[in-house]
Amino acid sequence: MEKINNPLLKAFNTAPFSQIKNEHYMPAFKEAIALSRKEINIITNNSEKPTFENTIVALDYSGSQLDRISSIFFNLNSAETNEHIQKIAQKVSPLLSELSNDITLNKQLFARIKEVYAQKESLDLSQEEHTLLEKSYKSFSRNGANLPDIKKSRLREIDASLAKLKLTFGENVLEATNSFELHLTNKKDLDGLPDSAIEAAHAEAKSRNKEGWIITLDYPSYIPFMKYASNRELRKKLSLAFGSKAFKGDAIDNQSNVLEIAQLRHERAQLLGYKTHAHFVLEERMAETPEKVIDFLNELLEKAKPAAQREFKQLEKFAKQEDSISKLQKWDSAYYSEKLKKKLFNLDDEQLKPYFKLENVISGVFQVAQKLFGLQFEEVFTIDTYHEEVKTYNVLDKDGHFISLFYADFHPRKGKRGGAWMTSFKSQYIKDGINERPHISNVCNFTPSTPSKPSLLTFNEVTTLFHEFGHGLHGMLANTTYPSLSGTSVYWDFVELPSQMLENWCYEKEALELFARHYETGEIIPMELIQKIKDSATFQEGMQTLRQLSFGLLDMAWHGKNPNQITDVKSYENEAFSDTSLYPDTPETCMSTSFSHIFQGGYSSGYYSYKWAEVLDADAFAYFKENGIFNKEIAEKFKDHILSKGGTENPMILYKRFRGQEPKPDALLRRAGLITNQNN
């Protein structure tokens, strides 16, 4: 296809989604890859002596066209995919992997980088320039630049295989999610479900040209059924379907993919001189080593496990009293927890949902950002989007200057993977005196509207929206010179600080009163409900903490040890879960085969970072609580020292500059109700 007709190869500011056809992608990728190679050749063939500007800076700005095309394509592969896009992804991923290797393993290029790196003490670099030089050198040395040719060749093979395996893993999970439906035709099977969930299930059936009601494995459909449906057998059926995604021994089974990914990552790490994949990854994290991560997780486990066991016993006793349940199973967890919560706090999600209309919550998170950081959000209708449900906003500062473009995509669709995430369509950086502002996106899977009700969020969905928006702010407020250090380009165990930090405002009266209004009457959420939200915030916190720790420990089991002797994914997983499991095992289910965070996304050896960042966020929010949750001075410090700085400096230095001290885990343990003020 001629360049002239390919929208991806023309100059554009905002992504030209409506003009892009599937056949545009491969020619665009090929041309952008060729351009990237040309840019690298200009650097390596430069007859002038290597300098910071002509080598390090030139390298960081290279490949910008390819970055834009990749961000559009791979974001769509997550949010609005189809078979054609998935096939292109399988073809293009090895090409990108090959290019990445060609750059990292380029001897001439590395020689120039090394020459600049050797003079680093005499170059009079700024902090950001120093970080960029360190990062550039390490990205080469840590990825094979010093290897002999035979090992470089094997590294290329591994990276090409991993690129394809990770895509296949994700495609299998998506297909397993989409291919299941619980089709109900007897109204009695819906007993216990709130009207909104029944209406949504009926709308789903109608959309599939079927009578009755359909429950799917998408969270807005799955969670209410597991929480409220009194039919235990149907909960079991749904729970086993959810837990056995890509674990059925069929064409979309992920067991061999899990083993192969783990083995190839291990081989790659060893090739590069590291003991395990986790040792390789954690060298560039705040936690530094797998040993520190495991100590950190086990320290929290020691505090959380007694509380979790107490809570589990309480739940068992309650289920026995309620329905003579002799042995609590996984499919009983959400159902009896919700009932117990209602009994203890006289609170359930259905009481809260009318106060959390999606549009009001969006307005609320915007108001919180305005009060903290002076940001204004104006919805615009002229920006091209990839789906009619996507909303777009111009983000302005208090003086009306453009800060960022924000895309918001909130509901489940067939072509969208599960979960919630923040991403970007354009990075922030400064070049030739122009501060290029970012295009940031939040993608979620929230309860959609029904014929009779607008989209009303569960409280968990409200905190998820705030969480992803926290990541969004990290992207929007980025203000660095170099693209590779901008926004969320930080250590992975630091990246969750802004997102988890923002969740705290969901529990505060001052914040809730800004947006939690009844969708029919406009009444502000009553104080008694706010108090109940706060009181119930630590409900089953021990069990929740244990669950998070189990995921972190499973991740470290796959990536912090030699996986070559593992033959059975399920039994290995059970071994990793042995210290954290409360419920009886279900042989039909396996988490690893659909654990997309670590086998498809970027969280391999990094799942612990959610808990790590919770220590930071609890400590940081305690600072706000002491001085007012909308304290402008502290918000400004958070913006200046954390949100705008990206990866320009070591995160602990940035954190201490904001907080004045290193974080203490006490704030997290206290917030979680795992210690009191009296004991430490």
Image (cartoon, rainbow, N blue to C red):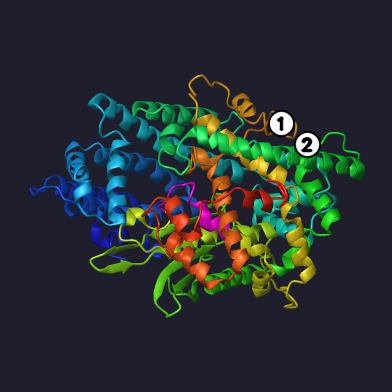
Q: What's under tag 2, amino acid-wise?
A: Gln
Secondary structure beneath dot 2 equals loop
Q: Which of 39 and 244 is in front in this view?
A: 39
The reply to whether residue 252 is in sight is no
Toward the top, the furthest residue is 565
The span picked out in magenta is 489-503
Secondary structure beneath dot 1 equals loop
Estimate the spatial distance between the alpha carbons at disc 2 and disc 1, rounded to whole Å: 9 Å
Q: Nearer the viewer, residue 371 or 402?
A: 371
Q: What's under tag 1, amino acid-wise?
A: Thr
Q: Which residue is drawn at 55% across and 46% down?
A: 612
- What number is the disc on residue 55? none
Q: Is residue 545 left or right of residue 401?
A: right
136 magenta-colored: no
What residue is disc 2 on? Answer: 329
What quarter of the picture does the N terminus occupy?
A: bottom left
Image position of 494 with respect to 390: above or below: above
Circle 1: is it few (<14), some (14-19), or many (20+) Cα within 10 Å?
A: few
Image position of 487 with respect to 675: above or below: below
Q: Do the residues labelled 2 and 1 touch (CB within 8 Å)?
A: yes
What residue is disc 1 on? Answer: 586
496 magenta-colored: yes
Q: Which comes before the other along the chain, label 2 or label 1?
A: 2
Tell me which corner region of the image, top left, top right, bottom left or bottom right, holds residue 18. Answer: bottom left
Where residue 418 appears, as percent x and y from the top left, is: 57, 49
Where residue 433 appears, as percent x and y from the top left, is: 25, 68
Q: Which residue is drawn at 49% across and 75% down?
A: 374
Where residue 299 appears, as percent x and y from the top left, is: 62, 37
